[in-house]
Amino acid sequence: MKIAIRKGRVIDPASKFDAVADVFIAAGKIVAIGEPPADWRSARDINADGCVVAPGLVDLAVHVKRGTLTTEIAAAAAGGVTSMVCSPDTDPVLDEPGLVDMLRLRAQSFHSTHLHPLGALTKALAGVQLAELCKLSLAGCIGFAQADRGVADTQVLLRAMQYAATFDFSVWLQPQDIHLANNGVAHEGEVASRLGLVGIPSSAEIVALATHLELARVTGVHLHVCRVSTTEGVAMIRAAKLNAIKVTADVAINHLHLIDLDIGHFDSNYRLSPPLRTARDRDALRAGVIDGTINAIVSDHTPRPEDTKQLPFGEAAPGASGLETLLSLTLRFAESAKLPMIEALGLITHHAASAAGLPAGRVAVDAVADFCVFDPGAYRLVTKASFKSAGKNSPFLGYELPGVVRATITAGHIAYEAAA
Amino acid sequence: MLSKKNLQLNDNGDLHHLLAIEGLPKRIIERILDTAESFVGINEREVKVVPLLRGKSIFNIFFENSTRTRTTFEIAAKRLSADVVSLDVGRSSTNKGETILDTIANLTAMHADMFVVRHNESGAPYLIAQHAAPHVHVVNAGDGRHEHPTQGLLDVFTIRRYKKDFTRLTVAIVGDVLHSRVARSQIHALTTLGVPEVRVIGPRTLLPADIERLGVRVFTSLEEGLKGVDVVTMLRLQNERMAGALLPSASEYFSRYGLTPQKLALAKPDAIVLHPGPMNRGVEIDSAVADGNQSVILPQVTYGIAVRMAVMAILAGATR
């Protein structure tokens, strides 16, 4: 279908293009920006006057289960997300090519988002035996991960990284020492001590990250650090990059806004993994994003059924719904950090795609026609009813946030359009 | 950040739930202590019952087993003429998959006026208070490692009976502060009442991170920490703490942190010794101290009933 997006402010973070222009789409690709191709006749004209026409968002951290794929793909479209990287801790775990095929085929049938699975690095994520990385890669896995399970046996981890490096596969690890984090539910510090919650010390991240970075150095594998959360973690990644270790990193948007104090009266919507840490850590994470140490901002979208959150803090399931608030919270972060919008958008489009090796996140001629068209001046109230996701669990319920998605286009297909 | 209102107080600033000592204004703590004073007399009479809560239904819901605390709440409620039902939920419905909120909804449908809740998870009483019907009051009878507010209140009530002026006291809390809800409640009660120096004493493995941010001085030596104190609170050390890497053995713990007459001699001569019970004799406290003339451990139990009567009476509005 031929689509023209008219009069919008086109922003392409990769080329630093930022100007009002018309965009022309045909056969799933961008065919022209500015002047229409010869003999152009649109099947559909989208009026983007007053809106930003950005690349479709690339979210590197989404947790989906097969049973909730329909709602979560709708949530992605409503949130302007056109590419999402899925964690392997689905049910069942993505450790067999057949399972990956099934997930991708189901996702493709919606024509509304590019779903890129991460395969399990070890069978059943048990951290004992390698999964069949080559077969999983052929089935479409873009990298290999352990979700939040970690690998306790460092020799297994070394072997896994060596093997992955052999075939240029990337390894995605959330740095959290499973012994130091044992039973913990909140950042170890004053707030957890006051509330009587079992702590997860910063050292749980630091110890694991030190191990991961050293093994990445030794093996030469591309290590993607998932969800850095501490001041020290940011500093270690910065130093590793200077030492030419092949490392990229992401941070959850929640951690750029919230701190452990926000738990308040044991509000389980603030139970996240990794835990919310201190104001000092939040400031270091923000600085790490601004100076490029951290490559991408992610939603860490973790939809949870209501009854798994209506529990005492320590028994509640960790995680927050995030696909539909990623754009707004990133804009709000940019606003408060005085970061130009084009740079903030880069963190959820082009830079994220580059870190993951995905051909996405561009508004350029011949690029795949993935777009997020949003009104940057409009505000929306976050309520449970506003979520298309099955997960209504958001720490931002009641917030009024900037940025309303008007349309989402995935490979030239209109995946979402806000009611006029 | 959105505002997080004080759940414990109603719009007039009166006590609506008792969930924690942290955040309670001094005037409310003092009112509870003064009210408890008037109930001590009743407990010493031959007829120990007053009709303040006649017709009210109080449910003791214990998701974690406890005989002593539950019993004192039962006695306190009965002496106020309330109807009391005690449920050991720990062993019944939640094990069958019923959630806390289901349990609470069912009991609310039975026209409860007050829930006395104990739970092994920190914060569980907050969840209940947030979902309870507006007329229902919630009393935290101990939640995880968080707080045990009526214990903290009875501790300061006991201290006030022996020591009068809080603003001249040095108080030491000794032992497993990490796992202790009693310690947290007592620290907040003491600092709110103006005690200028609260000390916590224990090995690093049993002290919570950044505990000094609660306004306490931290000591790792019992001898150093006891010097010149007016009040010593010994915390219970549970046997399961020896299983992991927190402590090597009960006897090594006793050698460094057990309260013996010799160690107690480092405190002021008229220092008193408290213990929330149940005691582990020979682990955290020597029998000669537990049964000695500086011990106020049994008076604590007696006063516990008066303090719990005061809390329930104030919550139910009967003394207004």
Image: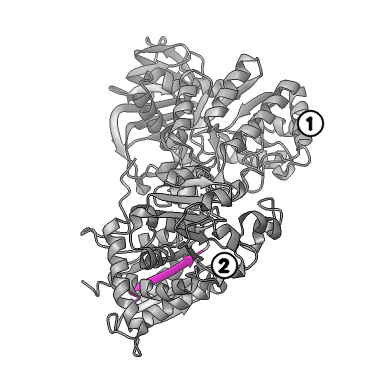
Quadrant in the picture for the N terminus of chain A: top left
As measured in the structure, the alpha-carbon distance from the residue carrying label 1 to the one carrying label 2 is 59 Å
Expressed as whole percent of the image width and height from the top left, the position of residue A222 reads 67, 23
How many numbered marks appear?
2
B134 left or right, relative to B92: left
Amino acid identity at mark 1: Arg
Q: Tell me which residue sits at (64%, 54%) in the image.
A: B256
Secondary structure mostly taken by the magenta-highlighted segment of the chain:
strand
Categorize mark 2 by other alpha carbons within 10 Å: few (<14), some (14-19), many (20+): some
| Label 2 sits on residue | B289
Find residue B171 and report its horizontal and vertical position in percent.
45, 55
Is residue B117 rendered magenta in the image? yes
Quick check: can you spot residue B36? yes
Q: Is residue A414 visible?
A: no
Write down the region rendered in magenta: B112-119
Label 2, secondary structure: give it. Answer: helix
Q: Amino acid at mark 2?
A: Val
Which residue is disc 1 drawn over? A159
Residue A285 in magenta? no
Label 1's element?
A: helix
For discs 1 and 2, the disc positioned in front in the rendered view: 2
User: Coloring scheme of the render?
Assistant: one colour
Within-10-Å neighbours for mark 1: few <14, some 14–19, many 20+: some
| Residue A174 x/y as whole percent | 61, 35
